[in-house]
Amino acid sequence: MYLACLSLPASLAEPKLELLGPALDGLNTGYYAHRIDEDDETSDWLMRWITEYAPDISDFTMRVNIWSQSQDLGIYAHEEDWTIEQIDESKNWLEESYKGFQPFEIESFYIYGSHHKDDLPKNKILLQIDAATAFGSGEHPTTAGCMEALLELKEKGVQPKNILDMGCGSGILAIAAAKLFPESSITAIDIDEEAVAVTDRHIALNDIAQKQIQTAAGDGFQCAICGENKPYDLIIANILAGPLKDMSKDLLDMLDQNGHVILSGLLNDQADDVISSYSSLTMINHRKIKEWSALLLKRD
């Protein structure tokens, strides 16, 4: 295994680093960013992707630059910006990565990894999610915003019966919805087959009945079971601003006449542009967590 390390300027905003991570999806097993000198906020960034095979730096550079351009990140990588480190495979790197993933709370939810050995709180909704940066452990503000929106619906007495999690990643949002709304049926879709496998594993870890959450890998709303299971009275899409805009018509076609929508994966300054693509819906809540937004909307 290898670490493909890309040096980036200190002035780069952290949210843009997070958006850069998926540039190598399908070629890496995880990614993370940190400052070269963690105690110095003027220190340059180091973006690291964990890869199973020796990286092709020319290919990686091209992929990063194409992704950056498609997401309007303003980042341009050069081949000389990369360093490659071979990982000592005598170490359990999955276990090592888990050590940095400490339990945390999002309102009523308590999220922890399988390595956690301490007692679990009895007054929280427990979610066992193993750290996998490429798919989402729940630490990202966009995931937190979606989970808070789910709790808001629960508190308002909304009881969705048919839920779609589009771009399910680790499955954390589908599983959170299953625990909040145990009578619901949930469809969880991701374009990445590995993400769906991670979701299936987390469903089992959290003792969710397989019949409650149906998973599939496919191209978004074109995935066969997506249309078979419509209409949905709750659709969750924690993706990126561009795809959220592009998929708005397909999403609205799948939404029940009184359905709710939770959208995230967008920066605060992208929110108005996304909202304009869903102008037929009523805004219930626009959450801002740091630089990120999560939108809760409803069809009246």
Image (tube, grey):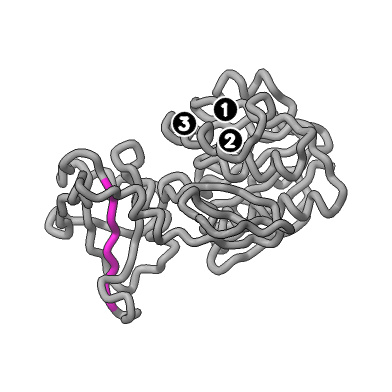
Q: Is residue 98 above or below residue 66?
A: below
Describe the element under mark 3 as helix, strand or loop. Answer: helix
The answer to whether 132 appears left or right of 49 in the picture is right
Which tag is nearer the camera, tag 2 or tag 1? 2
Q: Which is more toward the observer, 54 or 270?
A: 54
Q: Which is more toward the observer, 28 or 122?
A: 122
The residue depicted at 28 percent of the width and 56 percent of the height is 48
List x then y, in percent, for residue 239: 53, 45
Q: First in sequence, mark 3 or 2: give its number.
A: 3
Classify 10 Å Cα crowding around label 1: few (below 14), some (14-19), many (20 and above): many
Q: Is residue 300 above or below residue 224?
A: below
The answer to whether 94 appears left or right of 293 in the picture is left
The residue that disc 1 covers is 215
The residue that disc 3 covers is 197
Describe the element under mark 2 as helix, strand or loop. Answer: helix
Q: Is residue 38 visible?
A: yes
Rendered image: mark on residue 203: 2
The residue depicted at 22 percent of the width and 52 percent of the height is 3
Classify 10 Å Cα crowding around label 2: few (below 14), some (14-19), many (20 and above): many
Q: Is residue 59 above or below residue 40?
A: above
Classify 10 Å Cα crowding around label 3: few (below 14), some (14-19), many (20 and above): some
Q: Are marks 2 and 1 in contact (CB under 8 Å)?
A: yes
Q: First in sequence, mark 2 or 1: give its number.
A: 2
Dot 1 amino acid type: Thr
Q: Which residues are magenta?
A: 43-50
The residue depicted at 66 percent of the width and 45 percent of the height is 176
